[in-house]
Amino acid sequence: MSTDVRTESAAAPAAAGPAPVKKRRHWREAATGWLFVLPFAVLLVAFLLLPMAYAFKLSLYRSTLVEGEVFAFADNYRQAFADPLFREGVVRVVLFGLVQTPVMIGIALLAALLIDHATSRFSRAFRLAAFVPYAVPVVIGTLMWGFLYSQETGPFKADFLSSNVVLGSLGNIVTWQWAGYNMIVLYAALQGLPREVYESAKIDGAGAVQIAVRIKTPMIASALVLATLFTIMGTLQFFTEPLILQPLNPGAITNHYTPNLYAFHQAFSFQQYNYSAAISFLLGAVVFIGSYIFLFATRKRSALR
């Protein structure tokens, strides 16, 4: 009996031994993961969350000559809602997005389908050429197009920066800059599709156009939604291109041409930092609502199918 007791008591620590080791390994792996995430988390907090919190605080105050900074609660937001210049900029970028987004995504999808279908050695060179504009900084690309649009330095005699066509000229720059990026996203999605589906469709008598429209495009619907969502968000925050081209024709590209441009000039031209912060947060709300409407519409359409 005593021998059995000693045997059981000796086996107990051996059985309990691996548990603390596994626990320590789990905590070590978790700590390693957090260590890799830490630099991103620090940058996120320092350069996004804290500035946003400070900007939101600014939007709730108003600067006065007598009392200085006074708490105004929603006065700046009410002023922005009633500001016709802000509303005009919002309407302009919404209309711009309604035209620009389908055009850009359509060009990107067409290019991705053509490259996916092509088997020649030139397809890789075409992919690189289409992606190069995205690699060019936005400021450099806009300056380049500004020289091309100028009647003095450009090869064309038409005034591409007049009030009637300047929005289309800006849309051309945005399409040139971002269509290649969206094309790469859609092309990568096409590369992940099973090739057996294409072979089955060919056996059934489907041509290249039918395969592209009825098989490939529906199968990359999730990538199309993602690319369109990012395009909508970027379009509503339209800023760099009109800011760079504004000196070429200030009469056509006004200080309130887009909401972002309006907020920028309110802050750095007129020192209205509180009002500028309120405009920025209202623009953020517009971006959120626009993105939500698009996601809701695409999800409802998918459910109906």
Image: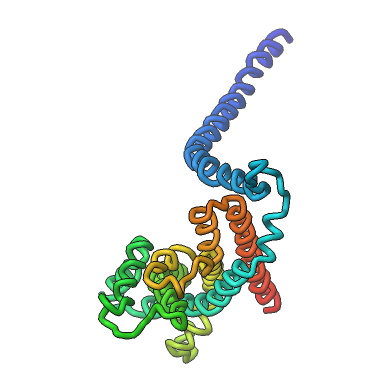
Question: Along the line of sight, which residue is nearer the eye, 30 or 22?
Answer: 30
Drawn side of residue 98 relative to residue 72, left or right: left
Residue 43 position within the rendered picture, expressed as x and y whole percent measured from the top left: 49, 42
Question: Residue 109 location in percent, x, y?
Answer: 45, 77
In the picture as drawn, the residue positioned furthest to the front comes out as 66
For the image, the number of numbered tags is 0
Which residue: 49% across, 69% down?
254
191 lies left or right of 65: left
Above or below, 123 against 243 in this view is below
Residue at 66% across / 18% down in the picture? 12
The image quadrant where one finds the N terminus is top right
Residue beneath the point at 30% across and 69% down: 144
| Quarter of the image where one finds residue 202 | bottom left
Q: Position of residue 260 (x, y in %)?
A: 53, 62
Q: Is residue 43 above or below residue 164?
A: above
Q: Position of residue 214 (x, y in %)?
A: 53, 84
Can I make out residue 223 in this image?
Answer: no
